[in-house]
Amino acid sequence: METAPVLIHIFNRPSLVPNLIEVVRMAKPKKLFISADGAREDKLGEKELCDESRKRILELVDWPCDVQTLFQESNLGTRYALIAGITWFFDQVEEGIILEEDCLPNESFFKFCTTLLEYHRHDPRIMHITGTNQQFGKKVGDASYYYSCFPSIWGWASWRRVWKLYDPKMSLFPELDKENMLLNVFSDPVIVEDLQIALRMTYDDQNMTWDHQLGFAIAINNGLCIVPNVNLVSNVGVKKIGPQQLDSVVSNIPTVELDVNNIVHPDFYIANRAADLNQITWSYEDTTTTNKTKFKYEQYNKKSSFLNKLKSKFLEA
C-alpha cells in the first residue's frame, strides 16, 4: 500500500528533525510537503535555527519522492503558519497525513492513517484520524480504534472535504454559544462550560491556537474522530512547566506498534463518551500543563461575566 501524502510542519528546532525523518523514511511517502514558519525578528538567533531546520530536513529526505516546500519569509505565528501550511497541502491532495516537528510517530502510524483514509474516504461522518491515544493503557472496546468527539492534532490525518469546513474565524460560534448547542454534542454541562470558554477565547483572539477551530468544525457537523486503541505518536516537544520543571503527563507517552495488517473496525459509529470523559478528566488533573491555562480561562470567564452584567444593567436602564 502506497503511503498517503505527508505534510511536515517545522519551525525552529533542528534537533528534532533527524528522528522524525528517520521514521518517515520507513514509510517512504511518494509525496512529501514541508511547510515552515519564518523567524521572529525579536528573537536573537532564531533565524539561524529556522534556516538550519530547513536545510537539515531537505538533506535528510533521501528516498525517491516529490518534495514541495512552503517556507515563509516572515513570521506568521503558530496559528496562521499552520493554517497556511495545511490549506496549501489540501489544495494539492485529497487526503493526507500531518505531522509537526515535535510529533514522533512509530512505523505503524503511517499505515494506520493510510488504510483508514481509504476506508472512510467517502463517509462524511468520519472527519479526523489521530495517532495519539491518551487513555494510558486503557483499551476502549475490542476494535483497533474507537470513535471520539475530540480531534487530537499530535500526528493526524484527514481529507480535503473536512478542511473545506474549517473556518478560522468560527463565524457560527456566537449562534452556537447563545443557544448552548454544545449540550447536543457533550451531555456534561461542566465539560460544555469549559469548552465554551475555550472556544470563546479563541473566537475573541485571546487564544491564538488553530486547532480549536478544527474541533468546532467537527462538532457543528456532528463528525467523528478516529483514535487508535494504542498510542502511535509521542509528543517530544512539550515544554517543562513550573518552578520544578515537571514533565506533563502527555509528554513523551511511549508508542506501541499496532497490527495494521489486521485492522478491526468498530461495530457502531458512535463516539465513546466514557473514553472522552476519561481523557478530559486526566487533562484537568495534569496540573503541570493546565493550571496556567485554567487560571487564564477563569480570569477570562470572570471578565466576561462582569461585562455581561454591565451590559444587562445598561440595557435595563
Image (cartoon, rainbow, N blue to C red):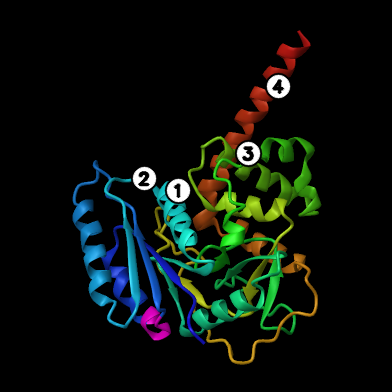
User: For the residue carrying disc 4, how many other residues have a C-alpha within 10 Å: few (<14), some (14-19), or many (20+)?
Assistant: few
In the rendered image, is residue 31 in sight?
Answer: yes
Which amino acid type is shown beneath numbered disc 3? Ser
Q: Earlier in the sequence, mark 4 or mark 1?
A: 1
Image spot of residue 4 (x, y percent): 49, 76
User: For the residue carrying disc 3, how many other residues have a C-alpha within 10 Å: few (<14), some (14-19), or many (20+)?
Assistant: few
User: For the residue carrying disc 1, how many other residues have a C-alpha within 10 Å: few (<14), some (14-19), or many (20+)?
Assistant: some
Main SS of the magenta part reads helix
User: For the residue carrying disc 2, how many other residues have a C-alpha within 10 Å: few (<14), some (14-19), or many (20+)?
Assistant: some
Q: Is residue 27 magenta?
A: yes
Q: Could you tell me which secondary element the residue under label 3 belongs to?
A: loop
Q: CA distance from mark 3 to mark 4?
A: 24 Å
Image spot of residue 5 (x, y percent): 46, 73
Image spot of residue 167 (x, y percent): 58, 46
Res 171 label: 3
Dot 1 and dot 2 residues touching (CB under 8 Å): yes
Res 76 label: 2
Q: Which region shows up in magenta? A: 23-28
- Horizontally, is 121 left or right of 295 in the view? right
Query: Residue drawn 72% across and 38% down?
Result: 177
Which amino acid type is shown beneath numbered disc 4? Lys
Q: CA distance from mark 2 to mark 3?
A: 22 Å
Which residue is label 1 attached to?
A: 79
Q: CA distance from mark 4 to mark 1?
A: 32 Å
